[in-house]
Amino acid sequence: MTTQVVDGTAAGTPARGGARRPRGEGRAGRFLARHWYAWAMCAPVVVVTLVLIGYPLVRGVYLSLTDATEANMGRTIGMNTIPSTYEFVGLANYTAIVTSAEFLSRLAWTITWTVVCVALHYGLGLGLAMLLNRPLRLRSLYRMLLVLPWAVPAFVSAFIWRYLLNGEFGVVNAMLRAAGLPGVQWLDDPLWAKASVIAVNVWLGVPFMMLALLGGLQAIPRELYEAAEVDGATPWQRFRHITLPGLRPVSSTVVLLGTIWTFNQFPVIFLVTRGGPGGSSEILVTYAYRQAFEGIRNYSGSAAWGVLILVLLVVMAVVYRRALRRQGEAW
Amino acid sequence: MVSTLTRATGPRTRTHGRGARGPARSAALHATLIAASLVAVFPVAWLVLTSLKPRDAWQSSTVELFNSPSLDNYLQVLTQTAFLRWLFNSLLVAAMTTVLGVVLAATTGYAVSRFRFPGHRSIMWMLLITQMFPVAILIVPIYNLLAGLGLINQFPGLVVAYLTSTVPFCAWMMKGYFDTVPVEIDEAGRVDGLTPFGTFWRLILPLSKPGLAVAAFYSFITAWAEVAYATAFMTGDDKYTLAVGLGQFVGQHKAEWGLLTASSVLIAAPAAVVFLLVQRHLVTGLTAGATKS
């Protein structure tokens, strides 16, 4: 990656475009001349990010410190403008959330959900990738079939699974009954509902991991395996000391992305169980969403949940990046 | 390329012994892959089968693959429901998101890939962290922002909301792609007197069409399949996108699984075909920054 770097002023700064380039003699001028191309090229995204994410973020953090709900939020009805009457309440929302039993149970379930899903994604994905990384007949056919769950839009898959797992008419229960077993209330029993959403999310997420890791496996130089074989390394030793370290760069990226995606996974839970039964399969994100858009809209409470979720994720990402850097890998 | 690589690495990742794989091990390998493929394909296959059954056949509690197959559900979806309206809405929103997102993301991806400048690391972090933003924290402020601008229940409002999630990711992915374009091409452009913008526009972009295509595809799919923003922002059913509209078939009081499955097939089939064509590039784009050392 570092080999690709081109210095902003490399080999004779271009003649064109010089018009807007400050001709300052001082250090500041040279500094500007050197980097303004890069900054100008980043400007659109930075502006969009600041306006569309930065402003809402700041506003969201502010809302989380107030008692704003649908009832006291300013709004315009026809010609009449009703001013906002919500007040600043400091950290009251946060203390209320953190001390509530709801928070701990939602957090515990969200973490369980994320860890189990990512572990299964990675484990199954790696297993399938290693199977596909062998000389094999019908390899591309298997590959295409296995990728199918990723190819179907997630909301469609969520609806499919809701039907398959339907207690009364679902095909899963029908097959169980045909085999002489009692049907299971997949979506109506708290524990089974959790197992079901995990299963659905694993079904959805494995193909991505599989493809990413397959790419990683194919990038490992085969000389390493040859040398290890000559030295009499067992298959397990080869896996442990060549495959796993060779996959590290890919693994670190996909595990981070997978964790973030799973933590924020909205459609699966929202559409498959609707958070039910009785809110038992609700993860932090869907819970915060319901606060904001169902019943009397609790804007401040939802924003506070959102801030907490974001803090959790940022802390996780920083810790993760730092751990990687300690092992000598960073950008 | 993939097949030759695999042929080369394959024998060495085998778990046992040397030489050819025994027939028993071959059988086990194929059995595992067939089982996995069945799990992957079954729900989709069942969806297609259900959509071909009569409208109320989903309520049967026996397992049957076929039940007087017909295209009635499809006909019903296309003529009796707002499906085509929702399809048009989804296409419109997804197309606008794609065009805007890719244009915005490409220049940033290039700058982050090629230049080291003050703020480089901050921008990389920004691109990563904005991908973590939970819907929950942004949705209310964006809702208020859009309400203030009168954009609730308007397509541009939804596009704006989608850009918050597609732009950072596309920029990240484009960076990975630009990293694979040899830097000598930039240097040649400079020697010929092109500005960095000229180099980017005339040399790098034309070479990066596959990368651009993947970013475009990603944006399109994200907008196509998004649920949370669309549910919250689109209040009139003439403005629903497919993801919201489909939920109407299986609401609180009715369950039209026949119609739902037929429309699901109509939505998923084109998406899946395009997806299977580009998926390899999608993964490469995602992990490109990481696989190069």
Image (spheres, helix red, strand yellow):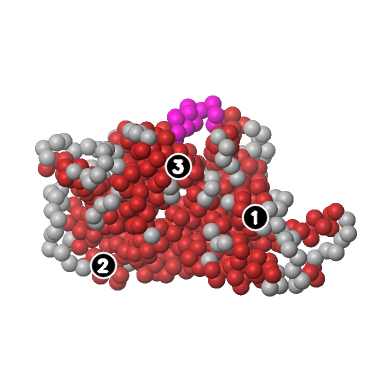
Residue A225 appears in the rendering: yes
Callout 2 amino acid: Tyr
The quarter holding residue B70 reads: bottom left
Q: Is residue A258 left or right of residue A165?
A: right
Do the residues indicated by labels 3 and 1 lie within the same chain of the protein? yes
B149 or A187: nearer the viewer: A187
* Tag 2 subunit: B
Q: Which residue is mark 1?
A: A5
Magenta residues span A97-111
Q: Position of residue A138 (x, y in %)?
A: 24, 56
Rounded to the nearest whole Å, what is the CA distance between mark 2 and mark 3? 49 Å
What chain letter is assigned to the residue under label 3? A
Q: For this rendering, which residue is in front, B270 or A104?
A: B270
For the residue labelled by badge 1, is the local secondary structure a helix, a strand or a loop?
loop
- From the top left corner, tell me how far across and down residue B136 is, in percent: 52, 45
* Location of the N terminus of chain B (image quadrant): bottom left
SS category of the residue bearing label 3: helix
Q: Is residue A151 visible?
A: no
Q: Is residue A35 left or right of residue B62?
A: right
Q: Residue furthest front?
A: A230
Q: Which residue is mark 3?
A: A246
Identify the residue at image location x=69%, y=70%: B191
Q: Nearer the viewer, mark 2 or mark 1?
A: 1
Residue B126: image location, x then y, percent: 62, 48
The span from disc 2 to disc 1 (Cα, nearest Å) is 54 Å
Q: Is residue A249 left or right of residue A155?
A: right
Q: Secondary structure at mark 2?
A: helix
Q: Which mark is residue B74?
A: 2
